[in-house]
Amino acid sequence: MTAETNWDQTYDVVVLGFGGAGATAARFAADAGAQVLLVDSAPEGHEGGNTRYAGQVVGAGTDFDQLKAYYKAMTAPMHLDEDMIDTYVDGMVKMPDYFRKYLGVEPLSIAKDWDHSKVDLHGILHEFPDFPGVNAYDLLVVHERQFDSALWKKLRKEVLDRSDKITVWYSSPAKHLVQDSQTGAVLGAQIEHDHVLLNIKARGGVIMATGGFENNPAMIQDYLKASRLAPIGSLYNKGDGIKLGEEVGADMWHMANYESLGMLHGLTFAGPAGTRGRLILSWPKAADGSTFTVGDDGSRYFNEAEANKHGHIYYHGTWQVPIANDHPHLIFDQAQWDAIHADKLPVDNFDDITIKAATLEDLAKLINAKPDVLVKARQDFDHFVEAGRDYAFDRPVATMRAFDDGPYYAVPLRQTVLNTQGGPRRNSRAEVLKPDGQAIKNLYSAGELGGINANQYQGGNNLAECLIWGKIAGENAAHGLTPTAATKTAAHTDANSGASEKQSDQQTDATSGASEHDSSKSETTDYHVGPNQYIGVSDAGMGNEIVVRVTYAAGKLENVEVLKQSESADVD
Ligand SMILES: Cc1cc2nc3c(=O)[nH]c(=O)nc-3n(C[C@H](O)[C@H](O)[C@H](O)COP(=O)(O)OP(=O)(O)OC[C@H]3O[C@@H](n4cnc5c(N)ncnc54)[C@H](O)[C@@H]3O)c2cc1C
């Protein structure tokens, strides 16, 4: 904030990021009476962040004390503020009621209601079965499916249903926070909207919900010690919230924590930088037969047959995400190649990305590994099969077959990044904290940006956190504001003000959301049809609305044209 700062528009609450946490925060701020601006850097149809790509399972529980014991065991040996843990655990125990009351659905319990004979989810339901309190943990879904954006679509709808209170801007990244230079209070945010940098005043507060830094190569290098990782969620999460927080003096926490998901210890097939990694939840052939995985030098580095816990594998008493290799490879022989090709290939371009050589020495050279190290890895592997025990990593020998005389193959792999947890430290009121533990006035956060989860991770924890702290952030930012009249003012400049306006009766000029975002909803009459043509509109996919024009005559389907869609082409 400088003497020259002019406000372009004023809202009660400004929410940065339209993913699960931001949608929740905006909705609860609106329900508390606030006029809300919700912005996302992604274009319309690609909002939703990681929440849209998630498995849609939400952490819940049946008993506070047991769930707390489970959560503490997962965090151990790290320390976490008791108040934070209690808020989180309490929120999870109350999650079934949250679903009923705020999402309007009867939750389906993975522990009690899910048909595990069709899809066995026991592994993800209790990822740490030996930890105390584990049996109190449950996962909730809105219906009996996964990975279909069902929860996300509900959260999004709650926002769109409040178009009188919530304005949504797409393709509008938050660039900076506006801070009172005297008090340090956050007064608003700078948003780039329609190529114009607007100063948006937030009377009650700004809520940061910009997700993680999965697509920020520098942060991945600095905080996660990896040269590169393959994102499997949104491509728009670039760690902006971390920069925004740094600018206003926020303390950071959990920067080194992240999760992976996928075959082996959370790997996928390597693809070009900047693209989403293919999520391969399971491919048994990667760890059964004459095959093993090597790191950069050509040596094995883990038990390929061990089931990973969101990328965490056993490490001397705890489970940790291994430091990512720069260019790990799956290595196999001709017999394994034959076995792989007897089944459906895990990816269509499998043969294109497979590297072949007559000898392991030559293969090592082609994959930039050390020939002697790769040859020794194979010799040891064969020896373990003969000896009846994998003395290096204890992979069950029943899953190992000695290598044949070649040729030999290598497939480039990459470690995935499901989510990052680091970001500005928050407290149980969702306030963002300074290094001295004091809250930065009027700055809140929710979700994966500065998440509570540290060390080991149980599936469902992140979305639970979005719902729990999204609500707290939204209600706190709106709390104490004088209700505003919902008068629409396009863009107005209002007087500079350095002071927080909470508890003040002065301000009555909130801009109203009106329905800028309602453009997303199509009527069949919006589209031209010729003879024998029909329009179909559906929101059953993952990317909001899809509109098709079907040409059908004399019992014959002649053409189907997709007129509007925002699905991710790379997601099955
Ligand atoms: C494949 C996959 C499966 C998962 N499955 C589960 C699961 O089943 N259960 C679970 O608990 N967790 C799961 N997770 C993790 C969970 O999805 C995320 O941690 C959670 O969705 C994060 O929500 P969020 O609202 O904090 O961030 P996001 O949902 O990522 O939303 C952040 C939003 O901020 C926007 N943004 C970024 N920068 C800016 C900016 N400068 N200005 C404005 N907007 C910005 C982004 O475009 C994005 O829309 C999964 C993750 C992935 C990738």
Image (cartoon, rainbow, N blue to C red):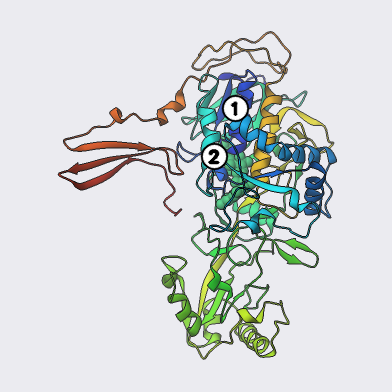
Against 154, residue 418 (above or below) is below
Does the closest atom of ligand 1 sit within 8 Å of the Cβ of label 1?
no
Would you say residue 242 is visible in this rendering?
no
Q: Are marks 2 and 1 in contact (CB under 8 Å)?
A: no
Q: Which percent across, then down, holds residue 432?
A: 74, 34
Crowdedness near tag 2: few (<14), some (14–19) or many (≥20) residues, C-alpha within 10 Å = many
Does the closest atom of ligand 1 sit within 8 Å of the Cβ of label 2?
yes
* Quadrant showing the C terminus: bottom left
* Residue marked by disc 1: 27
Q: Which percent across, then down, holds residue 426?
A: 75, 37
Against 202, residue 536 (above or below) is below
**For residue 42, side relative to residue 199 (left or right):** left
- Give the residue at x 54% y 47%: 144
Q: What is the tally of numbered marks visible in this picture?
A: 2
Badge 2 or badge 1: first in the primary sequence: 1
**For residue 538, side relative to residue 192 (left or right):** left
* Residue marked by disc 2: 152
Against 327, residue 464 (above or below) is above
Q: Quadrant of residue 570?
A: bottom left
Q: Which percent across, then down, holds residue 392?
A: 72, 80
Q: Secondary structure at mark 2?
A: helix
* Quadrant showing the N terminus: top right
- Give the residue at x 68% y 56%: 224
- Give the residue at x 58% y 61%: 262
Alpha-carbon distance for marks 2 and 1?
13 Å
Amino acid type shown at disc 2: Trp
Q: Quadrant of residue 117?
A: bottom right
Considering depth in this image, is 476 or 39 the residue closer to the camera?
476
Q: Which percent across, then down, holds residue 60?
A: 69, 43
Considering depth in this image, is 537 or 48 the residue closer to the camera?
537
Ligand 1 is found in which quarter of the picture? Answer: top right
